[in-house]
Amino acid sequence: MFKEEFLLKHSKLTALIFIALILGVIVGHFTPEFAVKMKPFAVIFLRMVKMIIAPLLFSTLVIGIAGHGDVKSLGKIGLKTIIYFEIVTTLALIIGLTAANIFKPGIGFNTVSGFEHMQEAGLMAASHAHTSVSEMVTTIFPTSIVDAMAQGNLLQIVVFSIFFAIAIVAVGKTAKPVIDILNSVSQIMFKFTEYVMYFAPLGIFGAIASTIGANGLSVLKSYFGIIGALYTALAVFVVLVLFIACKIARISFRSLLKVLQEPALLAFTTASSEAAFPKAMDVMERFGVPKNIVSFVMPTGYTFNLDGSTLYLAMAVIFSSQIVGINLDLNQQLVIMLALMLTSKGIAGVPRVSLIVLAGTLASFNIPILGVAILLGIDQILDMGRTTVNLIGNCVATVVIARWEKDFDYDKMKEFIKQEG
């Protein structure tokens, strides 16, 4: 009875999200002035999701580590996770650079459309994500867990949770009441997530309608080259990297995509990783990945494994050089790739942060920032694709690490796929 009720709710919500997506495009196209006013629905929905993330992540990660009492395995999981992330993001950079050199989206581009955003692009160039490795490492450690939760800094919450869980294990039986409370909090937050998801269709309608209303469908025509090149490169990355990673891990990528359709739709339509984060954690746990791996790898991935954003940055640098007539040779592109391997880490949690990183990278290599101004006009449309790939990439990462640890539950996966089917 419970399974049937769950499946009915799930299928209804997915259908409503699709309907909201279509209605958003129609309303945005035919009544743009009214559509722009729908943006508050998207903002409210995203705010509702954000209020879930901190308590959900904290409770699930602490339980995952302290509940099993196996702190030693965390170090192995952490090392394997970082190795996997580094390999995959490097491949994303290579595919992004290759696609930009093949499609050449910046050659012959009409640059007039970008000048209206030049002032904003200049401000972005003056900003920075990280200036050094030491700064990146330092910002991982929170001065206050309350501040980290308020800012939604996932990695700082992870660090605090790890130390908190280690302390619980060290204290022993005395800390059992805390584990029981956090276990209850975790279950409550997953139920809370279910309630918030009821508002997803309304939030998605507001996000799509306001985006189309503000930019119009005509914007797709003038930017077709860069949009088409990016989405093609993202598709190639999914097939060549994520599909093969699942194949190596002996997991059906098709089945994984099927169970991820709801969080993937949330990520795509809202262009927000945070919107899909709680639902994705729940799905991956149901899919057979242990709680401790899901609650560690997923949030860490949103800092170190942004495959879609990394690929986009590689393409955007070449695009920006092409539109101003600068021809970067292979050596220069490799140097830029190495720079992006550092600057693309830890870029989550700030609106349009990919463009801030792009502007800073271009300024570092003395390339005019006109490309940033041009991309500002369609950033929402590009963000939809790269955010979805970020989500799928991090979900694949949890599966790969679980298999690497020989801790993946195939029976649980088969049962969940059967339910979804």
Image (cartoon, rainbow, N blue to C red):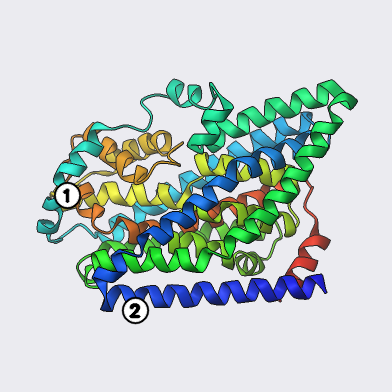
| Residue nearest the observer in this picture, 38 or 371 | 38
Name the side, left or right, on which 35 lies relative to 221. right
Res. 356 image quadrant: top left
What residue is rendered at 30% in x and 45% in y? 355
Q: Secondary structure at mark 1?
A: helix
Q: Crowdedness of circle 2 by 10 Å Cα count: few (<14), some, many (20+)? A: some
Residue 79, disc: none
Where's the C terminus, which quadrant? Answer: bottom right
Residue 26, disc: 2
**Contact, mark 2 vs mark 1 (Cβ under 8 Å):** no
Estimate the x, y position of residue 127 in percent, counting from the top left: 28, 32
> CA–CA distance between discs 2 and 1?
27 Å
Estimate the x, y position of residue 76 in percent, counting from the top left: 71, 33
Indicate the amino acid at tag 1: His
What residue is rendered at 47% in x and 44% in y? 90
Q: Crowdedness of circle 1 by 10 Å Cα count: few (<14), some, many (20+)? A: some
Q: Find the residue positioned furthest to the right.
A: 173
Can you see residue 420? Answer: no
Q: Secondary structure at mark 2?
A: helix
Can you see residue 202? Answer: yes
Which residue corresponds to mark 1? 117
What residue is rendered at 44% in x and 73% in y? 21
Q: Where 309 falls versus 151 (above or below)?
A: below
Estimate the x, y position of residue 210 in percent, counting from the top left: 32, 65
Name the side, left or right, on which 322 lies relative to 405. left
Q: Where 45 falls versus 177 (above or below)?
A: below
Foreground mark, 2 or 1, reads 2
Indicate the amino acid at tag 2: Ile
State which tag comes first along the sequence, 2 or 1: 2
Estimate the x, y position of residue 134 in percent, counting from the top left: 45, 20
Q: Where 132 falls versus 410 (above or below)?
A: above
Res. 351 image quadrant: top left
